[in-house]
Image (cartoon, grey):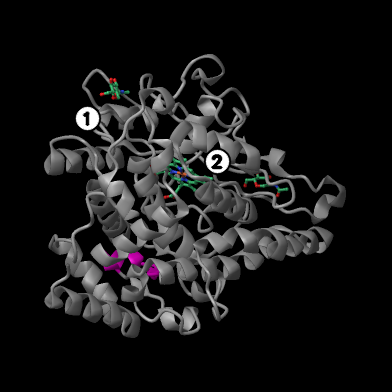
Amino acid sequence: MLTSTLLTYILIEASAVVAFPDIGRALAASHLKERIAPVAPFPEYPGSPSHVVYDSFDPVSQLVSTSGDNAWAAPGPGDIRGPCAGLNAAANHGYLPRNGIATADAINTGLWEAFGLDKTATLFLQTATMFFDGDPVSGRWSIGYHSDKTQSLGLVGDLLGNETGICAYGHLKTEGDASITRGDWLAPDMNSNCASYPEFAQELLDLATERTGGNITPQVLAEHSYNRKLHSIATNPNYFSPVYAGVAFTFGAHMFAYQLLANHSAEYPRGFLTPEVFESFFSYTRDANNNLVFTYGHERIPDNWYRRADDDAWTLTDILISTAQQCLSYPTNCQVGGNTGEVNSFSGVDLGDMTGGFINSVDDLSDPTRLGCFISQAIQADVPSFLDNVFSGAALTEVLGLVDTTLMPALAGLGDCPNLPAGKSVMEYGKGYPGAQFMTSGSRSPY
Ligand code: HEM
Ligand SMILES: *[C@@H]1O[C@H](CO)[C@@H](O)[C@H](O)[C@H]1NC(C)=O
Ligand SMILES: *[C@@H]1O[C@H](CO)[C@@H](O)[C@H](O)[C@H]1NC(C)=O
């Protein structure tokens, strides 16, 4: 349990950041100079308490097929791969369409079969992603950069805008900065948000060696997440962390890297993630000098790999609890805001103002119930403004009509949030931050 000193520290830090953004800046800068321990230890087994004691292993149902229809094949010409190790690996093994265009059915069945991701999570992720980055009418979205194959509204011709996919110009919606190994889209260099950078992967492996002797654990990933945010603040003048892509999704992916990629056995029913398994899933090989080499889109489910058990699935509730646990351990990870055009200029957005008073300090976000409603509020505010950027005319009317019938039911999994005030969209609260400017297309290469 927290000592009162720690609790006081969290409260002081959290409220200071909101009231005086400059203190947030000073804090970020001082953290860079001096490594600090987490405010409260991040749990060894995050998520729902049931995972802590899970102790069964069934080699038959947990072994994931990598042969026949599920044999690995590299993406062919025109097939799309992107920033998500899990989606790329699933597509390379036929658990998702090999062309990289996701559909609702494929997401719900493929991610369960391959990884044991519960339907509460896939329903939410599928729905949010098709609204943010794809086509809410057909449900299709690209697992990488823009593809013409996601659009279904052919009849409305030039009223149709540009569906971004989840990386490149999809930045800020689902994809955020300070990823496990991907670059920051608006950083001066190493700025592909679709490709993986060996430097960041090596940092994770080195941290794991230091902390555990080699295996990657949830605690190692939580610390890496903190390090990556400090790195972005210190090197990317345009670093920005919005609510969904920045506070929730980036960390959600950090947890997926263990919860969905770890191998399982009778000895380790809660999983163990070796560097070799991590490298296979992240499309890394070794060169003659044993240095990491990344190949775009070659993510692979290792042979003889056992996913998490059916009755120990990773749920939407687990995503919320582990994200809240992050906010308790690393409150600065949960600050909404960014640099103001220079490195080390982090300035926090006033949470009370952006949430209509629903959230008033980062400390509130360590409660999974409030965090769920905070994320729901942000998505409800963001979706119409993002749709407005991508669609117009009759197409816009049609997709806005789907907010009530399709988006809202899927957000119910984030919690029942009575009297939730309307929040502000990232386009409002991000005004003035160079890293919160949104474009749906342009001349940059996604790689
Ligand atoms: C509908 C479901 C999913 C969506 C929409 C999705 C989307 C994304 C996106 C947008 C990113 C980039 C995040 C960032 O910029 O930090 C990402 C990263 C990641 N995702 Fe997924 N993902 C999904 C399911 C999965 C699954 C099932 C797994 C694991 C089996 C997974 C594992 C990861 C990992 C490990 C990363 C971090 C990659 C890196 O930073 O190098 N995701 N995902
Ligand atoms: C997964 O764990 C099992 C049991 O320890 C082991 O036999 C198998 O080789 C491991 N798979 C991989 C890909 O490391
Ligand atoms: C959509 O965006 C992509 C990537 O920026 C670009 O290549 C394509 O030309 C755009 N299409 C339209 C219709 O604007």
- Read off the magenta span: 330-344
Residue 336 on the magenta segment: yes
* Residue at image location 60% in from the left, 58% down from the top: 410
Label 2 SS: loop
Q: Residue drawn at (39%, 35%), measured in percent from left and top?
A: 309
Q: Secondary structure at mark 1?
A: loop
In this image, 358 relative to 224: left or right? Answer: right
Whether label 1 lies within 8 Å of ligand 2 gets the answer yes
Q: Which residue is mark 1?
A: 267
Mark 2, residues whose alpha carbon is within 10 Å: few (<14), some, or many (≥20)? many
Q: Position of residue 228 (x, y in %)?
A: 29, 53
Quadrant location, the N terminus: bottom left
Q: Residue at x 22, y 47 (%)?
A: 220
Q: Is residue 350 visible?
A: no
Left or right, 24 with reference to 191: left
* Between marks 2 and 1 in the image, the one whose residue lies nearer the viewer: 1
The residue sitting at the right extreme is: 155
Task: Indicate which disc residue 144 carries.
Answer: 2
Does 54 appear above or below 286? Answer: below
Left or right: 233 as drawn, with respect to 299 = left
Queried whether the magenta region covers residue 26, the answer comes back as: no
- At label 2, the amino acid type is Gly
Where is 382 relative to 156, above or below?
below
Q: Amino acid at mark 1?
A: Glu
In the image, what residue occupies the spot 54% across and 51% down?
A: 125
Place of residue 229 in the rendered image (x, y in percent of width and height, measured from the top left):
31, 58
